[in-house]
Image: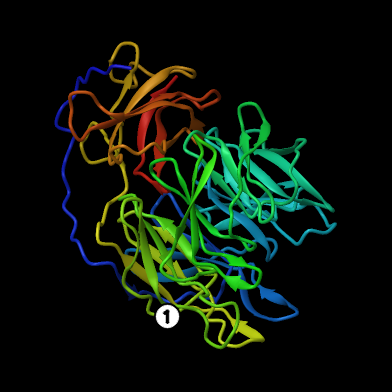
Amino acid sequence: MKTRLIFLGLLSVVAFAQSLGTFTATGNLSTPRFFHTATLLADGRVLIAGGNTAGSIGSPPLSTNTAELYDPASGSFAPTGSMSTATHAGGILMADGRVFFASSSNCSSGPLAAIELYDPASGSFNIVGTAAALTGAGATLLNDGRVLLIGCAGNNVGTEIYDPVAGISTPFPNSLPDVPSAAILLADGRVLLQFVEDDAQIYDPVSGSFSSTGGLCCFDGPPQASLLLNRYVLFSGGNDLGGNESSAELFDPALNIFAYSKMSIARDGHTSTLLPDGTVLLAGGLPVAAGPNPATSTAEIYDLNAGFSFTGSLATGRAYHAAVLLNDGRVLITGGSTFSSHESFQGLSSAEIYTPANLVPAASLLSLSGDGTGQGAIQHATTYQLVTSDNPAVAGEIVVIYCTGFVEGAVIPPQVSIGGRMAEVLWFGDTPGYPGLNQMNALVPAGVASGSAVPVWMSYIGRPSNQVTVAVQ
């Protein structure tokens, strides 16, 4: 769709200091934990939730239902509300700014999974429904704002869709051989399901169907996975028959093929974080399957053109920690465990910040005031007129939303929230004739409450933008 701009002067350039791939300590967690979630909120803070505090071989781990918030401005953690139960999957930022969780357990019969949402405004968790699947594989946010749940329902594999507008979770039939070890939203909106011992499958939310594709060659234990900017999925590490893996593979969803590669060292329980320059940070993990002090402090960068190479080292060796990309381009790494003995292991309360070589801030929506707040730089797609309180948008209409920060050549689409509901993005990219300016053409969702200042924000490469407003009738 061609675009004609009727406003100028909304684009500004901000310079950020660069540094060489380094790790520096930040504040300590209120509660030591590993196997927890870390979610970047719309206001730039990070929600740390759940996980285990300690464990020992042959015994259930000590879990926690506590949660806390990290403030990048102060570099400190502070407790917030607690979840209803200690075992949860999810940590998904929803279109209305709340965070989705579903209770999780081992594959056995049990009670219905509780679905609860964390509200950053009140700092509280609230149960909003139940799901039959125990979500052993976690949850995946779809591009239409619904959540795909896959896990154990008794002794079977259960699949459900949670609709946040209706507030219900609906089971549907599946042909899955097992609970997948990973579920990755692809650039085209489908979901790649990777199994430990079976071929991968792809879920298409449009048709509601599953289809088989190839499988990884070299993993018995679950690898880490990251969607790359060019549509490929990078799988790394894990374990194979008790030995940890240095293997890595690229999956091309267009051709349904996997290609083998190799990391610098073996890793299991590491983190894999897509950076906005298109590279991937692989940090920590277990280089060997057993032994005293096995957690590594090494980290490496994957570049599609250059392969794997070491970067700076973590201040503390850790595995089964959490990593999240911050709005300023740094990466927050929290908790984990050193796994300092054969029999028992303790959670870590330490946290650190990785500053990459290329520090890229989050994408930003433009506003008419030029400061990124108030009325957004948004047009009616059919007339090129600005959307204003005197000329509001209506549900089902295509609007053009202007922004900056899209990565050149990247195919991962933004996710756009209008009035707390996910909007369908029809097209995104560079604005013709205006270098450095980007745009999205999106449908105003049905059911959005009318008003002169309806909130609009987007999530791009996992990071939320600033919030602007639009008038909706």
Up/down of 414 relative to 385, above or below:
below
> What residue lies at 56% left-to-right and 78% top-to-bottom?
347
Quadrant placement of the C terminus: top left
Q: Position of residue 142 (x, y in %)?
A: 56, 38
> What residue lies at 23% left-to-right and 31% top-to-bottom?
368
- Residue 140 location, quadrant: top right
Up/down of 148 relative to 402, above or below:
below
Q: Position of residue 101 (x, y in %)?
A: 62, 53
Front in this rendered view, residue 262 or 182: 262
Quadrant placement of the N terminus: top left
Residue type marked 1 = Thr
The way the protein has been coloured in the rendering is rainbow
Q: From where the camera sits, is residue 71 visible?
A: no
Front in this rendered view, residue 25 or 195: 195
Q: Residues within 10 Å of mark 1 (few under 14, many from 20)?
A: many
State the residue position of label 1.
316
Element carrying mark 1: loop
> What residue lies at 18% left-to-right and 36% top-to-bottom?
11
